[in-house]
Amino acid sequence: MIDVVEILQHWHAGRPKLVLSASLGVDPKTVRKYVAPAEAEGIRPGDGLVLDRAGWAAKVAVWFPELTDSRARSSTWPALEARRDLISKMLETNTLATVHQRLRDEHDLSATT
């Protein structure tokens, strides 16, 4: 998973986006996506703003709430949560792949692995 806070910290410290992209192994478009809200707020590299990791994390939570709440990222969360007991019982005697297949075939659940 991409550490957005790390991207923002490096960018704010003055690392060019392309260099940052290469060193972190992240697509340049992804770097631009995560830097864009900071730029829109007027934040610039070397501007004197002092934010520690927690400060950047707070900004990320506002700019990208889907990254801080895993349930918001999953459209299947409610369906899986409703079957929590069934899944737990199935995992006692089956592999995850088998449980997934049985949920799909026997319980019409279209969650992906």
Image (cartoon, rainbow, N blue to C red):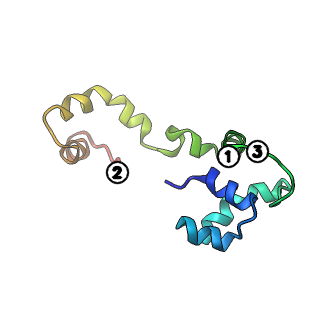
Closer to us: mark 1 or mark 2?
1
Question: Circles 1 and 2: CB distance less than 8 Å?
Answer: no
Measured Cα–Cα span from mark 1 to mark 3? 12 Å
Measured along the vertical axis of the image, is residue 48 above or below residue 83? below
Identify the residue position indicated by label 2 in the image. Answer: 112
Marker disc for residue 51: 3
Q: Earlier in the sequence, mark 1 or mark 2?
A: 1
Q: Which of marks 1 and 3 is nearer the N terminus?
A: 3
In this picture, residue 41 sits left or right of residue 78: right
Residue 16 location, x and y as percent?
A: 71, 70
Identify the residue position indicated by label 1 in the image. Answer: 60
Crowding around mark 3 (Cα neighbors within 10 Å: few <14, some 14 to 19, many 20+) is: few
Going 83% across and 59% down the picture, which residue do you hit? Answer: 46
Residue 55 location, x and y as percent?
A: 72, 41
Closer to us: mark 2 or mark 3?
3
Measured along the vertical axis of the image, is residue 46 above or below residue 22? above
Residue type of the residue flagged with mark 1 = Val
Is residue 37 visible from the viewing direction of this image? yes
In this picture, residue 63 sits left or right of residue 66: right
Q: Is mark 2 on a helix, strand or loop?
A: loop
Residue 62 location, x and y as percent?
A: 71, 42
